[in-house]
Amino acid sequence: MCGVCGCGTDGVSINKPHQHEENEHQHNHDHDHDHHHHHHGDKMIIDLERDILSKNNVEAARNRGYFEAKNIFTLNLVSSPGSGKTSILETTLKDLKEKFPFYVIEGDQQTLNDANRIDALNVPVIQVNTGKGCHLESDMIYDAVKQLKPKDDSILMIENVGNLVCPSMFDLGEQKRVVIISITEGEDKPIKYPDMFHSADICIINKIDLLPYLKFDLEALKKYALQVNHHLQFFEVSATTGQGMDTWYKWLETELERNKQKNS
Ligand SMILES: Nc1nc2c(ncn2[C@@H]2O[C@H](COP(=O)(O)OP(=O)(O)OP(=O)(O)O)[C@@H](O)[C@H]2O)c(=O)[nH]1
Ligand SMILES: [Mg+2]
């Protein structure tokens, strides 16, 4: 069990799309719930939390060193379920895959659905199924990267498990963290779930094609998000219509170049 967010880390599996199809609807339920530690009040929980996060941070540093040495520009895409992480990836890959070499790591508790969507675009992808886990951790990225074998000077997109809370605490060794919020979620999410917005470098506001149908205040969303992170940069897009995607591509290209200069 994870002492940070209470989720389990049992049953993690790393799969290539279209393989291990039997994993899609099954989950290993014979895991051992009798852990080898006992909680004596809050102290044990705090120690456990510190251990898990510091272990993750060490492994994140290892990942980051690997990405820097190979000049792989790595992004960690985080959002609540259904904000459009995979849709934004699909549109981005369709538009830019001839220009840059992309690799994708998909994180979900179960299914190969998202990996199959990326695989359909002929972009190399690995699915990490976290089982009971509600976020990706650095060692899962390390294992997935070993299978994915991204080339030097490429872009690695990591789609985290849909969850607006726990992934914020786990550095994966990425260069930039991208938080996605869709306008159907309500403008107050950044102040309700501040850690995710605080830890992000940029914020993609998705599904703006739905603005005419919703009572949603875009300026209020930005105001709330800036309250928790005044460096946050916004991109207003629709993954479906492609509206606004150019501004995000421009950012990606600029940061890619900046990252290359830094690593050379
Ligand atoms: N109208 C509209 N729908 C969108 C847009 N982007 C995504 N969707 C829809 O939103 C739903 C969820 O999209 P996904 O891309 O699967 O979302 P996700 O964040 O990857 O979801 P999880 O991986 O399950 O967390 C799908 O039905 C998409 O078609 C958009 O820009 N506009
Ligand atoms: Mg997805």
Image (tube, rainbow, N blue to C red):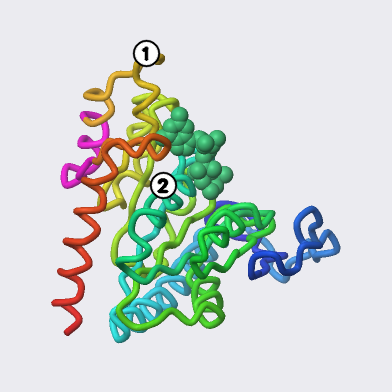
What secondary structure is marked by label 2? helix
Whole-number angstrom distance, CA of label 2 to CA of label 1? 23 Å
Viewer-nearest of labels 2 and 1? Answer: 2
What secondary structure is marked by label 1? loop
Q: Which mark is residue 237?
A: none
Res. 162 in view? no
Q: Residue furthest right?
A: 30
Label 2 vs 1, first from the N-terminus = 2
Q: Against 178, is 143 above or below?
A: below
Q: Residue at x 80, y 66 (%)?
A: 32
Q: Against 247, is 224 above or below?
A: above
Frontmost residue, 144 versus 138: 144
Q: Residue at x 49, y 49 (%)?
A: 86
Mark 2 lies within 8 Å of ligand 1 (Cβ measured): yes
- Taking the image as shown, residue 248 lies to the left or right of residue 240, namely left
Q: Where's residue 49, x and y in %? A: 51, 62
**Dividing the image into 4 quarters, which one contains the N terminus?**
bottom right
Please give the range of residues in magenta.
Answer: 223-234
**Dividing the image into 4 quarters, which one contains the C terminus?**
bottom left
Q: Quadrant of residue 147?
A: bottom right
Q: Give the class, few, some or many, for how many residues have Cα within 10 Å of label 1's Cα (few <14, many ≥20).
A: few
Q: Amino acid at mark 2?
A: Ile
Q: Which mark is residue 215?
A: 1
Say if the magenta span includes residue 118: no
Q: Which residue is mark 2?
A: 88
